[in-house]
Amino acid sequence: MMIAIANVFISIPLIKIMGPAGAALGTAISLIVGNIFFMNWYYQKRIGLDMIYFWKQILSFIPALIAPCIVGVLLMKYANITGLVKLGSYAVVYATVYALSMYFLGMNNDEKTLIMGPIKKIIHK
């Protein structure tokens, strides 16, 4: 609720200066300050969560997202999707690149074990 109130107090002067873009900027500023800075401080100091460790873990996913982003941009730019079959085939390509990238670059050993356990059960039936 405080973020929404801050949004109003930030956005109104910015709207007068910049017009509709001021509303977007005011919303962005209030969300960044409120959700990123204030809430992470609150979680760290008041609740006792280790937010530094959390963000290190989140940032470790960035290398795993590079290949899916590149494939997604290339598919959007060059793919001529004219029907459900082509859409489905492009979705399978993207999902495969994403899954492989996350498995090899984004997951830790515990997560890989959680994924491979059910797959091994299916294969060995």
Image (cartoon, grey):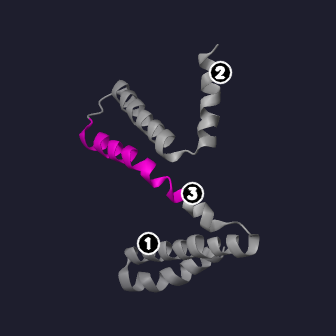
Q: CA distance from mark 2 to mark 1?
A: 50 Å
Residue 23, picture quadrant: bottom left
- At a point 26% along the width and 34% down the height, the residue shown is 80
Q: Earlier in the sequence, mark 2 or mark 1?
A: 1
Q: Say if the magenta span includes residue 73.
A: yes
- At a point 33% along the width and 42% down the height, the residue shown is 71
Q: Looking at the picture, which amino acid does disc 2 mark?
A: Lys
Q: Nearer the viewer, mark 2 or mark 1?
A: 2
Q: CA distance from mark 3 to mark 1?
A: 30 Å
For disc 1, the marked residue is 24
* Magenta stretch bounds: 58-79
For disc 2, the marked residue is 121
Q: Nearer the viewer, mark 3 or mark 1?
A: 3
**Residue at the farthest top position:** 125
Majority secondary structure of the magenta segment?
Answer: helix
Answer left or right for 82 relative to 103.
left
Q: Residues within 10 Å of mark 3 (few under 14, many from 20)?
A: few
**Residue at the farthest front position:** 109
Residue 15, picture quadrant: bottom left
Residue 107 percent location from the top left of the image: 55, 44
Q: Are marks 3 and 2 in contact (CB under 8 Å)?
A: no
Q: CA distance from mark 3 to mark 2?
A: 29 Å
**Vertical position of residue 108 compared to residue 12: above or below:** above
**Vertical position of residue 118 compared to residue 95: above or below:** above
Q: Under tag 2, what secondary structure?
A: helix
Residue 110 percent location from the top left of the image: 64, 42
For disc 3, the marked residue is 57
Q: Looking at the picture, which amino acid does disc 3 mark?
A: Gln
Q: Residues within 10 Å of mark 2 (few under 14, many from 20)?
A: few
- At a point 61% along the width and 61% down the height, the residue shown is 54
